[in-house]
Amino acid sequence: MTEVVVVGAGFCGLAAATALGEAGVEVTVLEARDRVGGRVEARANGLGETVDTGGQFICDDMPEVMALARHHGKTLVRSDFDGDHVAQPAMTRQDAERAYDGSAALRERMNQLSPDDPRLAGMSVAAWLAAQDEPADVKAAFRSMIEGLWCLDLGSLPIWHLIDNDRRITNEVGELQYQLAETMHSLAGDLARGLGGRVRLAAPVTRIERGPDAVRVVTERETITADAVLVAVPPVMASRIAYVPALPPALAGALRAWRSGTVIKVLVRYDRAFWRDRGRSGMVMWREPPGLFAFDASRDAAHPQLAFFIGGPLATEWGKRGETALRAEIEARLVAALGPEAGGMSDLTIRDWTGDRWSGGAYSDLVVDMRARHAEDALRVGAPPLFFASSELSPSFPGYIEGAIVAGRQAATEIVASLGGRLRG
């Protein structure tokens, strides 16, 4: 018997397990994948270089992940955004500035609304946007930005949820400020190593049974009895676990209220940063089709690289075309934006997160039930000694690595306080 079982070894679960261990609690972490990190991962590209194919970027306004990176001796690589940005479809610099400044102002106006305003009940982001008196190109830029960041179509996303979510993302420095030279995934590995043998990989949890004195966690290979369980996976993944007895109706409904985002991350390597020769930053922003975004993600001058993201409904559509067609589409879009040299790729790495088996998608899950205003609150309360935590539930930076760490540590504190004298540690 262990004191606490943590389900999931993403940054949320790892942060929670670390905090529990520091509090003297005996903890076991069960991870369905054969690696740690969750939506943060690294793979070898076609050149044999290890690259982050999942969550990667951080900034100075994310104190928890920045502190972890420094504690573990990681090398911060500052992103270079000097130079002209490119708008697609092409437009004059003046028109582009007006469109994108207008979309940012529209987002700010949205965030001035109260998510509890009864006029917003049952309203989607698409419906709210349609009611705004803005030029078409401003609305198109706003739509592309939101679908690219939240990776769902605006008709599925409640406006109150977007407001509540966006208000908790408080960075004033650009969120793409840094990447880690050693990869972000290496930081997850550092956290896991700090837990020693308490992390068990390839151990998907299928059922959680709550009894009067203990909780039983059932995997494909074993059953573990614990005083408490923290389900530290995205809500959609948490909803796929069987709970015995059934969860209280409000809690079960809260789990069903979410849908995973859809995104494809692409890393495009070149022999040289040709865009710099033309005074360009490498950043390309598409209004049409919505959900496309590219920028310079070079690790250093010797590794010129663009990151290209396909988010929202477009990721679902393009992901169905097959890899050959997808590669051709990506190349065509980059050539149209940056010129024929964009076709001279030395490597193209594609990571399609759409429908990922153990995360549902990326970057995060979002509430899509227009009536589920308090779904997050219900999950935060949980059904002690059964607790839930994920980046989506974080009081700060939901959907980010920072949010995952904050949520995990907060959950650990609540578990220790809840169990109190029952803990043997």
Image: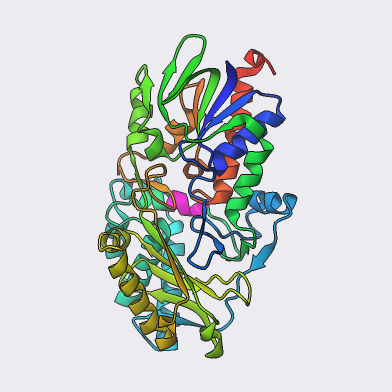
Tell me if residue 247 can be seen.
no
Residue at the spot x=63%, y=31% of the render? 197
- Give the quarter of the figure containing the C terminus: top right
Residue 136 versus residue 387: which sits nearer the camera?
387
Vertical arrangement, residue 224 with respect to residue 261, above or below: above
Tell me the quarter of the picture where residue 86 sits.
Answer: bottom left
Q: Is residue 166 magenta?
A: yes
**Outermost residue toward the top in this view:** 212
Tell me if residue 423 can be seen.
yes
Q: What's the magenta region?
A: 163-168
Tell me the quarter of the picture where residue 221 sits.
Answer: top left
Q: Position of residue 14 (x, y in %)?
A: 59, 38
Q: Position of residue 306 (x, y in %)?
A: 49, 73
Residue at the spot x=55%, y=50% of the render? 401
Q: Position of residue 274 (x, y in %)?
A: 52, 85
Q: Position of residue 257 (x, y in %)?
A: 33, 39
Magenta part mainly helix, strand or loop?
helix
